[in-house]
Image (spheres, rainbow, N blue to C red):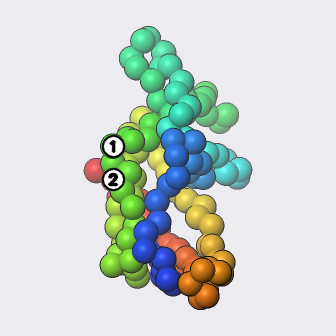
Amino acid sequence: MATLENVTKVRPLGDDFRWFLKLKCGNCGEIPDKWQYITLVESVPLKGGRGSASMVQKCKLCARENSIDILGDTITPYNAEDSESFKTMVQFECRGLEPVDFQPQDWTDYDEKAKESVGIYEVTHQFIKC
């Protein structure tokens, strides 16, 4: 959810857009302190030839190998009419990793052409298990 000021659409720009997340191990519950990011352009093979994922990582606490993949065809823009309401913008396929936090960046600027301020404020998020 976000408040949009003089902005008509917010969307990730390019396949190299970085989704900054905090990820929890589904096996032991460990949540590392550091932010991690995943992108559509990064693809790591899964063990046993079972395809690939945006990130494959071994838990530092329990040593279990987990993965998360961005489902690229689910990425949708957040439009002006969505302002101040929740909308699904992306879906992830999670195998052992659970996103627990997202780091958006509030953005403000001034549109010289329109001579007005523009901004994205009060960004909040929620994760829904499918």
* Depth check, front residue: 81 or 33: 81
- The amino acid on which the numbered mark 2 sits, given as a three-letter code, is Lys
**Farthest residue toward the front?**
113
| Residue at x 67% of width, y 51% of height | 35
With 84 as the anchor, is 31 left or right in this view?
right
- The amino acid on which the numbered mark 1 sits, given as a three-letter code, is Asp
Res. 38 in view: no
Q: How far apart in space, not on screen, are marks 1 and 2 (Cα)?
A: 18 Å
Q: Which mark is residue 73?
A: 1
Circle 2 — which element? loop
| Residue at x 35% of width, y 76% of height | 82
Q: Position of residue 29 (x, y in %)?
A: 54, 46
Task: Give the class, few, some or many, for how many residues have Cα within 10 Å of label 2's Cα (few <14, many ≥20).
Answer: few
Q: Position of residue 19 (x, y in %)?
A: 56, 50
| Residue at x 53% of width, y 34% of height | 41
- Above or below, 23 against 125 in this view is above
> Which quadrant: the N terminus?
bottom left
Report the mark closest to the observer, 1 or 2: 1
Task: Give the class, few, some or many, for how many residues have Cα within 10 Å of label 1's Cα (few <14, many ≥20).
Answer: few
With 36 as the anchor, is 86 left or right in this view?
left
Q: Which mark is residue 129?
A: 2
**Farthest residue toward the right?**
34
